[in-house]
Image (cartoon, rainbow, N blue to C red):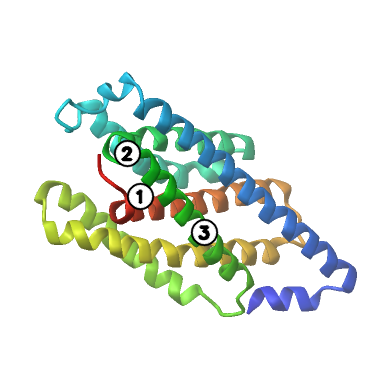
Amino acid sequence: MAQYDTIRSAGVGARAQIDEGLRAHMNKVYGLMSVAMLVTAGVAWGVGTSDLLNFLRTPDGGMTILGWVVMFAPLAMIFAFGAMVNRMSAAAAQLFFYTFAAVMGLSISWIFTAFSLGSIFQTFLATSAGFAALSLYGYTTKRDLGPLGAFLIIGLIGLIVASVANIFIGSQGLAFAIPLIGVLIFAGLTAFDTQNIKNSYIEHAQAMDQEWLGKSAIMGALNLYLNFINMFMFLLQFLGNRE
Protein backbone atom coordinates (compact mmCIF):
# COMPACT_ATOMS: atom_id res chain seq x y z
CA MET A 1 0.00 0.00 0.00
CA ALA A 2 1.16 3.53 -0.78
CA GLN A 3 1.32 4.71 2.83
CA TYR A 4 3.71 1.95 3.83
CA ASP A 5 5.90 2.70 0.82
CA THR A 6 6.04 6.30 1.99
CA ILE A 7 7.19 5.24 5.45
CA ARG A 8 9.77 2.76 4.14
CA SER A 9 11.23 5.29 1.74
CA ALA A 10 11.81 7.78 4.54
CA GLY A 11 14.89 7.71 6.73
CA VAL A 12 14.84 6.70 10.40
CA GLY A 13 14.52 10.29 11.58
CA ALA A 14 11.81 11.04 9.04
CA ARG A 15 9.89 7.92 10.03
CA ALA A 16 9.98 8.94 13.67
CA GLN A 17 8.76 12.41 12.71
CA ILE A 18 5.91 10.95 10.64
CA ASP A 19 4.89 8.65 13.52
CA GLU A 20 4.92 11.53 16.00
CA GLY A 21 3.02 13.77 13.62
CA LEU A 22 0.46 11.05 12.93
CA ARG A 23 -0.27 10.64 16.63
CA ALA A 24 -0.71 14.39 17.00
CA HIS A 25 -2.93 14.48 13.91
CA MET A 26 -5.18 11.67 15.14
CA ASN A 27 -5.40 13.25 18.58
CA LYS A 28 -6.54 16.46 16.93
CA VAL A 29 -9.13 14.59 14.86
CA TYR A 30 -10.60 12.90 17.94
CA GLY A 31 -10.39 16.13 19.91
CA LEU A 32 -12.34 18.08 17.29
CA MET A 33 -14.89 15.29 17.10
CA SER A 34 -15.28 15.23 20.89
CA VAL A 35 -15.91 18.97 21.07
CA ALA A 36 -18.50 18.67 18.29
CA MET A 37 -20.19 15.85 20.19
CA LEU A 38 -20.38 18.03 23.31
CA VAL A 39 -21.90 20.86 21.27
CA THR A 40 -24.49 18.50 19.77
CA ALA A 41 -25.36 16.94 23.12
CA GLY A 42 -25.65 20.34 24.82
CA VAL A 43 -27.93 21.81 22.15
CA ALA A 44 -30.04 18.64 21.87
CA TRP A 45 -30.56 18.42 25.62
CA GLY A 46 -31.14 22.16 26.04
CA VAL A 47 -33.81 22.28 23.34
CA GLY A 48 -35.28 18.79 23.86
CA THR A 49 -35.98 19.35 27.56
CA SER A 50 -37.42 22.86 27.23
CA ASP A 51 -40.34 24.66 25.61
CA LEU A 52 -38.05 25.54 22.70
CA LEU A 53 -38.93 22.15 21.23
CA ASN A 54 -42.44 23.50 20.56
CA PHE A 55 -40.98 25.51 17.69
CA LEU A 56 -39.91 22.25 16.02
CA ARG A 57 -42.62 19.80 17.07
CA THR A 58 -46.39 20.02 17.32
CA PRO A 59 -48.22 18.75 20.46
CA ASP A 60 -49.21 15.53 18.64
CA GLY A 61 -45.60 14.73 17.73
CA GLY A 62 -45.64 16.08 14.19
CA MET A 63 -43.17 18.60 12.80
CA THR A 64 -43.65 22.31 12.29
CA ILE A 65 -42.37 24.05 9.17
CA LEU A 66 -39.26 25.05 11.11
CA GLY A 67 -38.92 21.43 12.23
CA TRP A 68 -38.81 20.25 8.60
CA VAL A 69 -36.19 22.88 7.80
CA VAL A 70 -34.06 21.85 10.77
CA MET A 71 -34.37 18.16 9.86
CA PHE A 72 -32.92 18.64 6.37
CA ALA A 73 -30.51 21.46 7.31
CA PRO A 74 -27.59 19.13 8.29
CA LEU A 75 -27.74 17.36 4.92
CA ALA A 76 -27.76 20.69 3.07
CA MET A 77 -24.84 21.93 5.18
CA ILE A 78 -22.79 18.81 4.35
CA PHE A 79 -23.20 19.42 0.62
CA ALA A 80 -22.37 23.12 1.08
CA PHE A 81 -19.28 22.30 3.14
CA GLY A 82 -18.02 19.88 0.52
CA ALA A 83 -18.40 22.56 -2.16
CA MET A 84 -16.74 25.35 -0.14
CA VAL A 85 -14.09 23.68 2.00
CA ASN A 86 -11.25 24.16 -0.50
CA ARG A 87 -11.84 27.92 -0.43
CA MET A 88 -12.08 28.10 3.37
CA SER A 89 -9.32 28.70 5.86
CA ALA A 90 -8.81 26.05 8.52
CA ALA A 91 -10.33 28.40 11.14
CA ALA A 92 -13.44 28.98 9.01
CA ALA A 93 -13.82 25.24 8.38
CA GLN A 94 -13.61 24.55 12.10
CA LEU A 95 -16.25 27.19 12.86
CA PHE A 96 -18.50 25.67 10.19
CA PHE A 97 -18.01 22.23 11.75
CA TYR A 98 -19.08 23.41 15.20
CA THR A 99 -22.05 25.30 13.71
CA PHE A 100 -23.04 22.11 11.92
CA ALA A 101 -22.78 20.21 15.22
CA ALA A 102 -25.16 22.72 16.84
CA VAL A 103 -27.67 22.37 14.00
CA MET A 104 -27.41 18.60 14.29
CA GLY A 105 -28.24 18.98 17.98
CA LEU A 106 -31.39 20.86 17.02
CA SER A 107 -32.38 18.18 14.52
CA ILE A 108 -32.14 15.33 17.05
CA SER A 109 -33.46 17.20 20.10
CA TRP A 110 -36.79 15.37 19.81
CA ILE A 111 -35.23 12.17 21.17
CA PHE A 112 -35.57 13.53 24.72
CA THR A 113 -39.35 13.43 24.41
CA ALA A 114 -39.48 10.12 22.51
CA PHE A 115 -37.07 8.01 24.59
CA SER A 116 -36.25 7.67 28.27
CA LEU A 117 -33.12 9.46 29.46
CA GLY A 118 -31.69 6.19 30.74
CA SER A 119 -32.02 4.43 27.39
CA ILE A 120 -30.47 7.40 25.59
CA PHE A 121 -27.47 7.24 27.92
CA GLN A 122 -27.15 3.45 27.59
CA THR A 123 -27.32 3.67 23.80
CA PHE A 124 -24.66 6.38 23.86
CA LEU A 125 -22.37 4.14 25.89
CA ALA A 126 -22.98 1.19 23.55
CA THR A 127 -22.28 3.39 20.53
CA SER A 128 -19.11 4.74 22.12
CA ALA A 129 -17.77 1.24 22.82
CA GLY A 130 -18.55 0.04 19.30
CA PHE A 131 -17.14 3.17 17.71
CA ALA A 132 -13.89 2.91 19.68
CA ALA A 133 -13.39 -0.73 18.68
CA LEU A 134 -14.15 -0.08 15.00
CA SER A 135 -11.93 2.99 14.84
CA LEU A 136 -9.09 1.10 16.51
CA TYR A 137 -9.48 -1.68 13.96
CA GLY A 138 -9.37 0.81 11.09
CA TYR A 139 -6.22 2.39 12.51
CA THR A 140 -4.30 -0.82 13.16
CA THR A 141 -5.36 -3.19 10.37
CA LYS A 142 -3.00 -3.85 7.48
CA ARG A 143 -5.92 -4.78 5.25
CA ASP A 144 -6.82 -2.25 2.58
CA LEU A 145 -10.38 -1.15 3.37
CA GLY A 146 -10.69 0.94 0.17
CA PRO A 147 -12.88 -1.56 -1.73
CA LEU A 148 -15.14 -1.92 1.32
CA GLY A 149 -15.42 1.86 1.58
CA ALA A 150 -16.56 2.21 -2.03
CA PHE A 151 -19.26 -0.42 -1.45
CA LEU A 152 -20.41 1.26 1.78
CA ILE A 153 -20.66 4.71 0.17
CA ILE A 154 -22.93 3.28 -2.53
CA GLY A 155 -25.01 1.69 0.23
CA LEU A 156 -25.12 5.01 2.08
CA ILE A 157 -26.57 6.79 -0.96
CA GLY A 158 -29.25 4.13 -1.21
CA LEU A 159 -29.95 4.42 2.52
CA ILE A 160 -30.45 8.20 2.27
CA VAL A 161 -32.83 7.82 -0.66
CA ALA A 162 -34.81 5.09 1.14
CA SER A 163 -34.98 7.12 4.36
CA VAL A 164 -36.31 10.23 2.63
CA ALA A 165 -38.77 8.18 0.58
CA ASN A 166 -40.08 6.41 3.67
CA ILE A 167 -40.98 9.72 5.27
CA PHE A 168 -43.73 9.96 2.67
CA ILE A 169 -44.39 6.23 2.08
CA GLY A 170 -44.52 5.12 5.70
CA SER A 171 -43.57 1.49 5.01
CA GLN A 172 -43.22 -0.60 8.19
CA GLY A 173 -40.82 -2.97 6.45
CA LEU A 174 -38.50 -0.14 5.45
CA ALA A 175 -38.85 1.40 8.90
CA PHE A 176 -37.43 -1.81 10.39
CA ALA A 177 -34.77 -2.44 7.73
CA ILE A 178 -33.34 1.09 7.53
CA PRO A 179 -31.94 1.24 11.11
CA LEU A 180 -30.43 -2.25 10.81
CA ILE A 181 -28.74 -1.50 7.49
CA GLY A 182 -27.73 1.94 8.76
CA VAL A 183 -25.87 0.52 11.78
CA LEU A 184 -23.93 -1.87 9.53
CA ILE A 185 -23.05 0.83 6.99
CA PHE A 186 -21.81 3.36 9.53
CA ALA A 187 -19.95 0.70 11.49
CA GLY A 188 -18.03 -0.15 8.34
CA LEU A 189 -17.51 3.50 7.47
CA THR A 190 -16.01 4.15 10.91
CA ALA A 191 -13.21 1.65 10.24
CA PHE A 192 -12.79 2.83 6.64
CA ASP A 193 -12.69 6.54 7.49
CA THR A 194 -10.18 5.99 10.30
CA GLN A 195 -7.85 4.16 7.95
CA ASN A 196 -8.36 6.84 5.30
CA ILE A 197 -7.48 9.62 7.76
CA LYS A 198 -4.30 7.78 8.72
CA ASN A 199 -3.31 7.02 5.13
CA SER A 200 -3.99 10.56 3.92
CA TYR A 201 -1.76 11.99 6.62
CA ILE A 202 1.11 9.60 5.83
CA GLU A 203 0.87 10.34 2.10
CA HIS A 204 1.11 14.10 2.71
CA ALA A 205 3.28 14.09 5.84
CA GLN A 206 6.58 14.96 4.17
CA ALA A 207 5.11 18.10 2.56
CA MET A 208 3.97 19.36 6.01
CA ASP A 209 1.40 21.74 4.54
CA GLN A 210 -0.06 23.15 7.77
CA GLU A 211 -3.16 24.57 6.09
CA TRP A 212 -3.91 21.20 4.50
CA LEU A 213 -3.21 19.36 7.75
CA GLY A 214 -5.60 21.64 9.64
CA LYS A 215 -8.46 21.18 7.19
CA SER A 216 -7.71 17.48 6.83
CA ALA A 217 -8.13 17.01 10.58
CA ILE A 218 -11.47 18.84 10.47
CA MET A 219 -12.73 16.78 7.53
CA GLY A 220 -11.63 13.59 9.28
CA ALA A 221 -13.34 14.64 12.50
CA LEU A 222 -16.52 15.48 10.57
CA ASN A 223 -16.60 12.06 8.91
CA LEU A 224 -16.09 10.22 12.19
CA TYR A 225 -18.62 12.48 13.93
CA LEU A 226 -21.25 11.68 11.30
CA ASN A 227 -20.55 7.96 11.65
CA PHE A 228 -20.98 8.15 15.42
CA ILE A 229 -24.17 10.23 15.32
CA ASN A 230 -25.78 8.00 12.74
CA MET A 231 -24.83 4.78 14.55
CA PHE A 232 -26.25 6.26 17.75
CA MET A 233 -29.52 7.30 16.14
CA PHE A 234 -30.02 3.96 14.39
CA LEU A 235 -29.14 1.97 17.52
CA LEU A 236 -31.58 4.08 19.50
CA GLN A 237 -34.37 2.72 17.30
CA PHE A 238 -33.52 -0.76 18.63
CA LEU A 239 -32.26 -0.11 22.15
CA GLY A 240 -34.26 2.95 23.19
CA ASN A 241 -37.22 2.68 25.58
CA ARG A 242 -39.96 4.87 24.18
CA GLU A 243 -41.73 7.25 26.53
Q: Quadrant of the N terminus?
A: bottom right
Residue shown at the point (30%, 65%) measured from the top left: 181
Q: Which residue is mark 3?
A: 129
Q: Which amino acid type corresponds to the residue marked 2 in the rendered image?
A: Ile
Which label was assigned to residue 159?
none
Name the amino acid type tagged 3: Ala
User: Which residue bears the numbered disc 2?
Assistant: 111
Furthest-front residue in view? 118
Q: Secondary structure at mark 1?
A: helix
Q: Secondary structure at mark 3?
A: helix
The image shows residue 224 at horizontal and vertical percentages of 51, 54
Residue 157 in the image: x percent, y percent?
31, 60
Residue drawn at the location 18% of the way across and 33% of the way down: 61
Q: Are marks 1 and 2 in contact (CB under 8 Å)?
A: yes
Q: Crowding near pointer 3: few (<14 within 10 Å), some, many (20+)? A: few
Q: Which residue is mark 1?
A: 233
Secondary element at image label 2: helix
Q: CA distance from mark 1 to mark 2?
A: 9 Å
